[in-house]
Image: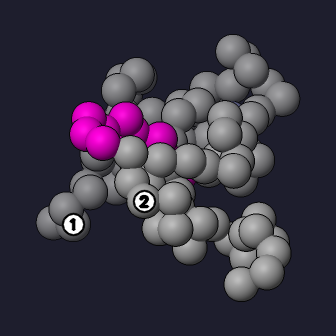
Amino acid sequence: MPQHYRAVVCKFFLKGNCLMGDKCAFLHKWDKSKLPICDEFKKFGSCKDGDDCPYKHELENKSECNMFRLGFCVYGDRCRFHHTHFPGPPPDPATIEAAKPKQFRRKGD
Ligand SMILES: [Zn+2]
Ligand SMILES: [Zn+2]
Ligand SMILES: [Zn+2]
């Protein structure tokens, strides 16, 4: 049995028309914690359907933002990665600079 067997609610079931019935590998049950993540939200960071959208609007599998981990992220709230606050002294500014995408780096080096 696949590891993710029925770990996520079936998208077709959510729309009310899953043809797989009992054979479906996805969950045919309304379970809020097991809803699939909204494709649109995943792609664009927002979803025009808002609260009407049956899918989850959060990216739980977001990876850690490298830039933010070093203390500063040029994308701020719009960043696609997870911003976790770590305790401790701020990192070396040169390290932060090196983690930025090229176009955001200070010119001259
Ligand atoms: Zn299904
Ligand atoms: Zn959505
Ligand atoms: Zn970031």
Q: Residues within 10 Å of mark 2 (few under 14, many from 20)?
A: few
Does residue 89 lie above or below 97 as drawn? above
Labels 2 and 1: the sequence-earlier one:
1
The residue under label 2 is: 92
Residue at the image position 84 percent from the left and 29 percent from the top: 48
Name the image quarter holding residue 8: top left
The yes-or-no answer for disc 2 within 8 Å of ligand 3 is no
Residue receiving disc 1: 2
Tag on residue 48? none
**Residue 2 visible to an observer of this rendering:** yes
- Which residue: 35% across, 27% down? 33
> What x and y, as percent, mark residue 64?
41, 54
Q: What span is in magenta?
A: 81-89
Q: Separation of disc 2 and disc 1 at Cα?
A: 45 Å
- Determine the main secondary structure of the stretch shown in magenta: loop
Frontmost residue, 105 versus 78: 105
